[in-house]
Image: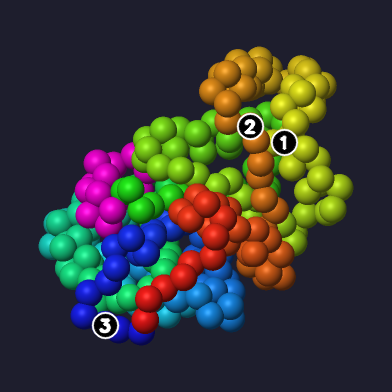
Amino acid sequence: MLVHGYEGDFMNNIFFVGTAGSGKSTMVGAFKKWLDDNEIDSVIVNLDPGAEKLPYVPDIDIREWINLDDVMSQCGLGPNGAQIAAADLMAVNMNRITEVLDGYNVDYVLVDTPGQLELFAFRESSQVVVNAMGRENSMMVYLSDPTLYRSANGFVSTLTLASLVQFRMNMPIINILSKSDVLKESEIDRILDWYNNSDSLYGCLLDEDSNPESIIGMELFRALEDGGIFGEMRSVSSETGVGLPEIYAAVQLQFRGGEDAERDN
């Protein structure tokens, strides 16, 4: 619903972040539908200037102001260089995005970040983006590709990346196991147990000791354990809808102490 201005205390940003192929855009679309079905107001902001097709209709789309083909031709860059340049140009155009956001009165802003994780997490332009949208009203949903979690070593490596992203962006984070529908129930249970029970993960790392990489994995594990990273992970599927209520519950806990949003009309 469009109005003139919005109540800043109610406008909370959820940045969906993860490696390429982790299912960010599909999850954004599925979560938007779940919110709509439950009569919870939200809008979608697409911040990926290189997206060719999206599984949802964005309310605000960075591609209206930044066209990757134009960046390539005007700057004489290839696809990779153009992605980097476009990521930096995004910060320059943030005033346009926030001006459009000022016209919405919703509970949540769902932000679909660039497919290449490093373009969002490790460039200074993203700090400009988050600050412009309101860091104090922002959090991340970090999607982990299940194919990277099939070994204890892969699990630790991916979890290390998630912790680096959280450190870099300085925002609260929810870790979710994306695309859980492609895994067997036993695989889901094992992965969730690794996250919820660090002793179980430690034992599996020891079992993989024949792999030279596991030595590094053990050091990363200790660093993660000392940093208090382990806790809770949610198994989610945008295809089946499993876990979407749990994402909402975690978001509510972060922003409102677990209470459902109540808006003034």
Extent of the magenta region: 120-134
State the CA–CA distance, disc 3 to disc 1.
43 Å
Position of residue 63 measured from the top left corner of the image (x, y, whole percent): 28, 71
The color scheme shown is: rainbow
Q: Secondary structure at mark 3?
A: loop
Disc on res. 230 = 2
Q: Residue at x 33, y 75 (%)?
A: 105
Q: Is residue 92 above or below residue 39?
A: above
Q: Is residue 227 magenta?
A: no
Secondary structure, mark 2, is: loop
Q: Is residue 205 above or below residue 181?
A: above
Quadrant in which the N terminus appears: bottom left
Residue at the spot of label 3:
3
Q: Earlier in the sequence, mark 2 or mark 3?
A: 3
Q: Which residue is mark 1?
A: 196
- What's under tag 1, amino acid-wise? Asn
